[in-house]
Image (spheres, rainbow, N blue to C red):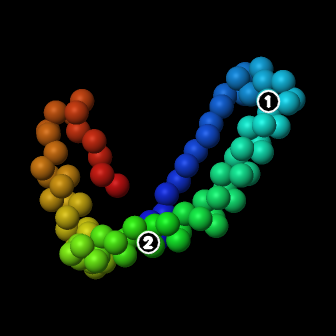
Amino acid sequence: MFPKLQVLAAGKGAWDGLDDADQLAVREAAADTVSHAVMDVPAQEDSELSQLCANGMVIVQPEVALLADLTVRADAAQPTDPSTRRPIN
């Protein structure tokens, strides 16, 4: 229900520093994680969301224009110091 992105990254030097067995273990663990995520996570999230709604949480899906307006207002509320300002795209 809520898209997420999980990343496992390694530099070429670090990857090349692993022996074949360790590289295989990382590849297999990544494949197992993807399989779990595809099969189990959506049902778990649906269950958790149902529980939240049963306890009074109201879920809304705002219109794109409203999200754009909120983004503009949030951007305006950010500090004006360029070193601390984080752009919202």
Measuring 54% from the left and 63% from the top, which residue is drawn there? 41
Percent across and percent down for residue 77 are 12, 50
Disc 2 packing (10 Å; few <14; some 14–19; many ≥20): few
From the viewer's perspective, is 89 left or right of 66? Answer: right
- When the figure is inspected, residue 8 is found, relative to residue 31, above or below; the finding is above
Return the x and y of residue 57 as percentages of the image width and height: 23, 73
- Can the viewer see residue 62? no
Kind of residue at badge 2: Ser
The residue tagged 2 is: 47
| Residue 63 horizontal side relative to residue 69, left or right | right
- Camera-side residue: 79 or 27? 27
**Residue 37 showing in the rendered view:** yes
Percent position of residue 60, x then y: 27, 77
Amino acid type, residue under disc 1 in the picture: Asp
Q: Earlier in the sequence, mark 2 or mark 1?
A: 1
Q: Is residue 63 left or right of residue 49?
A: left
Find residue 22 and name its label: 1
State how many labels appear.
Answer: 2
Q: Quadrant of residue 26?
A: top right
Residue occupying image coordinates x 29% and y 46%: 87
- Closest to the observer, 58 or 14: 58
Relative depth, front residue between 56 and 79: 56
Q: CA distance from mark 2 to mark 1?
A: 36 Å
Q: Position of residue 48 (x, y in %)?
A: 40, 67
